[in-house]
Image (cartoon, helix red, strand yellow):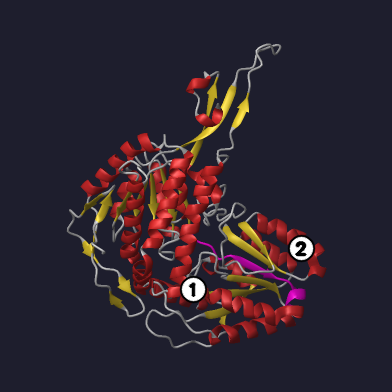
């Protein structure tokens, strides 16, 4: 069923001679299928087709696009075990994770469909004319939102379904009325092709214009760079590394017509644990955080990579307990040999810094499996060494022993932007947390109280973004219904005849 070809609208295309295969990280071997990288001509054809489709697709009704999104979810479900098996072979993730992520992907699509049918997502504003207002008459003004144009979506490595071909970026862009071109992630190109096939079938069944969706293979950076530079592309969605996201962001802003690039990038997701919480429930929180740090081999953008606490006997007990518990959890396979190699390099780099002490026993693991670890450092050393602030993508967390509350607040203030910040405390300490909440709110996009940051609910109240480098624009979320706001812009109609107004403004 996997051909390795590109989708340019509904047409399959394989003009290139650059061929690559995905890797089964569990077996540490290449998968059987091959993928053909898109050529320059195929990229240009896809963007031209998307631009033509936009002229028609932007005029479709909310209900028509809702039917399209529902049909995509239906077609993904019809792929059945074929999709799940390819997902597992390309990611090393277990069947349960594949099933759960497929469900999340379909839920996102159906959620946007429901939002469209409700019809109030544009936040329409109408100010009627007051012709006899003194000293000057007031004109009739009505504001709505319209789609930006073709959107390029970069599939992510760590979520082959929910943040990739038919993930949140694609679902929200299609909901907004924007055609989508996916730059498929090379680590799960087979999974991407199957999902692309489902989207194309759904487009055909619901009468969407050809070119409303395309899927291009790439094993390097050339395809992505050309897509972002193409003048017919009007916005970009990216989930991945700071290095990759920043490079694309710079390209998008150097264009003759700069375009928005919404990148969700690095985060170490600081966790503040109070003395009271350590004293009363330290064992409980060590258990919870051992699970959170190792969840999915630590390959979540919300993985708790930094734990902040003031020196105390409770902290000493907590760190010993966490170090013991984390190594008792079975090591799990990482997504790709390159990801495992990068994890080992960064973990060793952080662990070898002056003042850093490893707390957990080194593990012997199979190839591509993650050897989870915890280390500690003083607040002074952390403040003096920027290398300790970097994300280690995998099951690793650094405990920072703060001398006092002022140092803890200073550390929070000097952190780079983060997706999440967490506070673990007892109810009796609530009145003492105001300053910590205030500082965290300036550095993160979501604050959690007495929980773990791993797990991102898909709902209107979710904010998945944060100050740079967590994301390139902290005003927007990449998850939840409000993610659609990235792909639309406001437009006002002044003194317009009713017959010429968009339906929502009449």
In this view of the protein, can residue 170 be seen by the observer?
no
Residue for badge 1: 296
Image quadrant where one finds the C terminus? top right
Q: Is residue 356 left or right of residue 336?
A: right
The residue shown at (74%, 67%) is 405
| Snapshot quadrant of residue 320 | bottom right
State the image coordinates of residue 470 (x, y, percent, origin top left). Answer: 53, 57
Mark 2 — residue? 433
Residue 77: quadrant of the picture: bottom left
- SS for callout 1: helix
Percent of width and height locating residue 103: 48, 63
> Would residue 327 be counted in the magenta stretch?
no
Q: Is residue 42 above or below residue 293?
A: above
Q: Residues within 10 Å of mark 2 (few under 14, many from 20)?
A: few
Residue 240, image x, y percentages: 44, 60
Residue interval drawn in magenta = 265-278
In the rendered view, would you say 364 is above or below 498?
below
- In the rendered image, which quarter is residue 235 located in? top left
Write the residue at 58% across / 34% down.
124
Residue sitting at 63 percent across and 63 percent down? 421
Of helix, strand and loop, which one carries label 2? loop
**In this view of the protein, which residue sits in the foreground, 388 or 108?**
108
How packed is label 1: few (under 14 Cα within 10 Å), some, or many (20 or more)? many
In-image side of 366 versus 21 (left or right): right
């Amino acid at each position: 069923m996997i051909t390795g070809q590109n989708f340019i609208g509904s047409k399959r295309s394989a003009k290139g001679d650059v061929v690559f295969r995905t890797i089964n990280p569990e077996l540490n071997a290449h998968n059987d299928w091959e993928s053909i990288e898109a050529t320059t001509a195929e990229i240009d054809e896809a963007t031209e087709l998307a631009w033509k489709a936009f002229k028609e697709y932007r005029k479709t009704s909310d209900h028509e696009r809702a039917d399209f999104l529902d049909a995509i979810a239906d077609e993904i479900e019809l792929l059945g075990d074929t999709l799940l098996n390819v997902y597992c072979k390309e990611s090393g993730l277990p069947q349960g994770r594949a099933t759960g992520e497929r469900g999340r992907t379909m839920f996102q699509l159906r959620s946007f469909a429901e939002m469209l049918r409700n019809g109030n997502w544009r936040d329409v504003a109408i100010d009627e004319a007051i012709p006899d207002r003194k000293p000057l008459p007031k004109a009739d003004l009505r504001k709505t939102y319209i789609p930006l144009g073709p959107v390029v979506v970069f599939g992510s490595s760590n979520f082959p379904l929910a943040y990739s071909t038919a993930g949140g970026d694609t679902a929200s862009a299609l909901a907004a009325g924007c055609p989508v071109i996916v730059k498929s992630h090379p680590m799960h190109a087979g999974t991407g092709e199957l999902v692309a096939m489902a989207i194309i079938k759904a487009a055909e069944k619901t009468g969407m214009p050809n070119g409303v969706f395309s899927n291009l293979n790439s094993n390097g950076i050339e395809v992505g760079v050309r897509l972002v530079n193409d003048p017919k592309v009007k916005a970009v969605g990216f989930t991945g590394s700071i290095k990759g996201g920043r490079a694309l962001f710079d390209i998008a802003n150097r264009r003759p017509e700069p375009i928005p690039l919404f990148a969700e990038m690095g985060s170490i997701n600081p966790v503040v644990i109070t003395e009271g919480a350590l004293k009363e429930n330290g064992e409980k929180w060590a258990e919870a955080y051992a699970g959170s740090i190792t969840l999915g081999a630590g390959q979540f953008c919300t993985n708790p990579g930094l734990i902040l606490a003031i020196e105390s006997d409770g902290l000493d007990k907590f760190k010993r307990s966490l170090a013991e518990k984390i190594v008792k959890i079975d090591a799990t396979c990482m997504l790709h040999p390159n990801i495992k190699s990068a994890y080992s390099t960064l973990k060793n780099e952080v662990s070898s810094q002056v003042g850093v002490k490893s707390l957990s026993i080194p593990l012997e693991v199979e190839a591509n499996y993650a050897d989870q670890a915890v280390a500690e450092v003083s607040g002074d050393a952390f403040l003096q060494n920027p290398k300790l602030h970097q994300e280690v993508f995998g099951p690793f967390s650094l405990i920072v022993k703060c001398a006092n509350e002022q140092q803890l607040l200073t550390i929070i203030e000097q952190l780079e932007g983060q997706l999440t910040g967490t506070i673990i405390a007892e109810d009796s300490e609530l009145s003492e947390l105001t300053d910590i909440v205030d500082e965290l709110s300036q550095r993160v996009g979501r604050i959690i109280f007495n929980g773990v940051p791993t797990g991102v609910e898909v709902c209107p109240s979710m904010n998945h973004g944060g100050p740079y480098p967590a994301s390139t624009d902290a005003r927007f979320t990449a998850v939840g219904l409000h993610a659609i706001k990235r792909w639309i812009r406001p437009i006002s109609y002044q003194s317009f005849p009713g017959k010429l107004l968009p339906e929502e403004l009449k």
